Amino acid sequence: MWGRYFVVLLLALTPHAVLSNELETVYEWKQIVFGFPTDADRQEAIANGNLVPENATPIDVAVDYHSEKGTRVFTTTPRFTTGIPYTLAVVTNTTEDNGPVLMPYPDLSWHNSYGDDCDKITSVYRVAITECNQMFVLDTGAIFTVKHCPPQLLVFDLNTDTLSHRYVFDPSIYTANASLFITPIAIVSDPPPTGNCSNVKVYMTDVTFHGLVVYDSEMDAAWRIENRFMYPHPDQGVHTIANETFILMDGMFALASDQEQLYFHPLASVTEYAVPLSVINNRNNFLDSDVAMPEAFSQVGTRSSSTAAEAMDSQGNLYFVTFNPIKLTYWSPNATYTPENEIEIPADPQLIEFVSGMKVHTNVTGVEELWMMSNRFQEIANGAIDFSEINFRILRRPLDDIQNSD
């Protein structure tokens, strides 16, 4: 009997599992390599000042494992400035000196209006892929800080690479030249094989005007929610990564869900917050005020350091990479969210300097995988990026060892 209690006590005092899987670098770049359908397209981009690879910073990664097109890896390059020929791309198997070649998704014609045609794509930070072979593309409508178009949510059918739906946000949902929609996650309530994928909720962050937007596919409607927890913390806006210090006062940034709660945090914060989905999914709760029901929001944890992206697996493990020290880690749903309960996953810190995009995808064998985009943003913020070094990486790690150890 005493032996059993000793084992339980040992497990309680040691938040570290014996893990066998390793973090794999799938793709890496010194500088982003933009491919074009034809050389004429490339020359036109150069002539118009729309191809300046050193201006490109990849932000997100998403994987299509299950469509009729076969496995594909997508990335985003938001238009922080000029010189970005397209903002959503597929990573190809062709590699040049600086790294793998990208190709525009779904094709170049969707990207080459640069805000002049709001039916095209202007700038994308992150996307969400569902089990319905849909990709939800959140278009900010902005280039740098100038709003050229209303933000919009585009839904692409990954089996056909065609647009299946477009939702343009009403001006009541955002503030022009102030709002910036950067992170979507999608939850399908009627997934295959029994469902028809008609009931999808998409949750989106407004990082600069500090809000949450909910889109309901059945209603084809969206509503805005605000709460004091969505603001950056003034004492948490100075960050240090790999001995590089920079200031980034981003608010509402990352989202994750266990199908019951929506978890979120500002980037300039060490605190994780949550709100029940049952509250934010009910549009009626926020018809009179977007700051309604403040009591439904709660603080659920504190980290050892700030973090950017986060993701949650099907067992409720919440993954993130802390800034200082640089650690790939997770919180188990079986423990309180404290720095002491952060379970470190072995990883070379150089590979995971500023993970801006993170997803959990299920591969073709049914194993969940953690996918990440790291981009050394601290070097970009300080104007110190060296394009002779590897700067951008897409990383992958199977999660079965973690899930089987819980």
Image: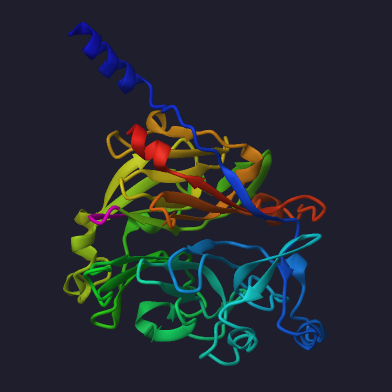
Closer to the camera in the image, 143 or 17 = 17
In the image, residue 128 lies in the stretch drawn in magenta: no
On screen, residue 122 versus residue 41, left or right, reads: left
Image position, residue 99 (x, y; %): 74, 60
Image position, residue 113 (x, y; %): 63, 89
Q: Main secondary structure of the magenta part?
A: loop
Image position, residue 88 (x, y; %): 58, 73
Closer to the camera in the image, 246 or 35 = 35
- Which residue lies at the image location 44% right of the left edge and 73% below the top edge? 135
In the image, residue 261 lies in the stretch drawn in magenta: yes
- Height in image: 8 above or below 291? above
- Which residue lies at the image location 67% right of the left edge and 70% below the top edge? 102
Q: Which residues are magenta?
A: 258-262
- Which residue lies at the image location 55% right of the left edge and 83% below the top edge? 121
Q: Is residue 59 visible?
A: yes
Q: Which quadrant holds residue 6? A: top left
Quarter of the image where the C terminus is located: top left
Q: Identify the colour scheme used.
A: rainbow
Image position, residue 283 (x, y; %): 21, 74
- Height in image: 317 above or below 263? above
Q: Is residue 233 visible?
A: no
